[in-house]
Structures are given as structure tokens and as C-alpha cells.
Image (spheres, rainbow, N blue to C red):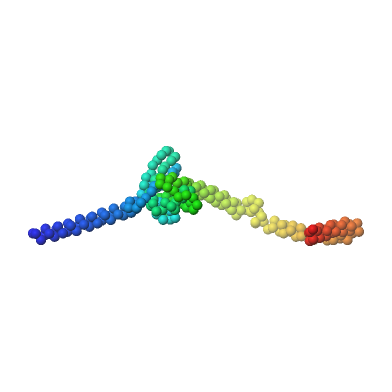
Amino acid sequence: METTTEKFKLRLGIFVAAGLAILFGIIFFIGKQKNLFDETFQVKAMFKNIGGVQVGNHVRFSGINIGVIDDISILSDTSVQITMIIENKLKKFIKKDAIASVGSEGLMGDKLINIGHGNSNTESINNNYTLRTSEPVETDDILASLQVTGQNAEVISTQLSEILLRVNNGNGTLSRLIRDTTIAENLNQTIINLKSGTKNLDQNMEAAKGSILLRGYFKKKQREADKIKNQKANPK
């Protein structure tokens, strides 16, 4: 009987010790996440819309988790204040002209606050400093924009289908231009006539240059052209 009691006490002691170890591990993990064991300072940011950010979510700087969101307060119908707890050793890297924005951990991850880089020559922030912010783009706005784009694409596709159907059925001027070989032959002949007319015009101009009546005129024009050419070649 005594042996059974001792075994029971031993098992109970092991169970209690394991439970305490797990409890301390949880406390340490939460404390590490909340920066309870490090020196910290507070930073604030004002948003019109925080896009789903929650207390306990991460704060990032240069892609690194540097703190957590400690409090979210609604100050008015157009103003929400986020209070962040950040490791004190990082204070010198965050400048007063840095901008805070709402981001996310991947496409479907938790929302977080990103703090951008400021000017290296700007003074570092101090405790309870309020950062400038940029408002997040809402998913609903993106979906609404995509829906409008899809509707426009559908209208354009329908109109193109109607135009191609008319062309295939032989209706309209464009269809006649494509299908009627007579029109194509006429256009071909017109181009040939234009080339022939241009050739004849050149021949007439050459003949005019040889004319006694117009020879002086063409020589005068040639002298003026040569004069302009010499001025360009030998500028003063």
C-alpha cells in the first residue's frame, strides 16, 4: 500500500512539474511576443480606417518585427488611434518623418503596421510620438474596381462580336472592302495611275526647265538654293 502511494505521489509531482514548466514556457513566449522583458517605448499613429488591424498584431520596420500593437482607440467617426509598443533599442532608427501604413503578412495573413524609412538626417522619434500615416486600400474598393473593369470588358467584347458578325455576313462598307475584289482592283489601278501621273509630271518639269521662257526662272531658283546651301556649309 505504501509503495502504491509513493508511486502516486511521484507521478503527481512529475505532472505538476511538467505543468509548471509549460506554464512558464507560455508566459515566457507571450512575454517575448509582447516585449514584456525588454525596455520599450510607445509610438502612436492616427488612421481613418485601420483595415482590420487588431491588438497584438505585429509592428514591422524594414521587414523585421520590432513590436506589437498595444491599444486601438476610436477617437471620432473619422479618427482611430493605434498605440504600438516597440523595443527601446530601435528608437534611434525610426525618424520623425517616417510614415506608418497598414500591411499584411502575405495575401491572406494578419494585418500589421509597417513603419517606413525616414530621412537619415531627420531627428529620431521620442516616447509617445505620433507618426504620419498613409491610408490602406480597401479590398472592397479593389473588388469594385475589378467589377467595373469586367463589365466594361464584357461590353467591348459584345460590340466586337457584333462587328465581326456583320463583317462575316457581308454587311457594311468594311465587309465590302474585304470581300469585293472589284474594289481592291480599282484601288490597285488608282495607285498605278498615280505613279504614272507622277512620272509624267517629272517629265513635264524636266521639259519646262529646258524651255527658253522658263530657263531663267529655274536658274534663278537654282542660284538661290546654292546660296542657301553655301551659307549653311560656311556659317560666319
Residue 42 seen anywhere in this rendered image of the structure: yes
The C terminus, quarter of image:
bottom right
Residue at image point 16% right, 59% down: 10
Horizontally, is 64 left or right of 24 in the view?
right
Horizontally, is 194 left or right of 172 in the view?
right
Vertical order, 172 against 207 (above or below): above
Comparing 24 with 226, the one in front is 24
Residue at image point 81% right, 60% down: 230
The N terminus, quarter of image:
bottom left
Horizontally, is 175 left or right of 41 in the view?
right
Residue at image point 89% right, 57% down: 216
Comparing 143 with 86, the one in front is 86
- Residue ranking furthest to the right: 212
Looking at the rendered structure, the number of numbered marks drawn on it comes to: 0
Residue at image point 33% right, 51% down: 36
Q: Position of residue 173 (x, y in %)?
A: 66, 51
Q: Position of residue 78 (x, y in %)?
A: 44, 40
Comparing 198 with 173, the one in front is 198
Q: Position of residue 95 (x, y in %)?
A: 46, 50
Comparing 20 with 180, the one in front is 20
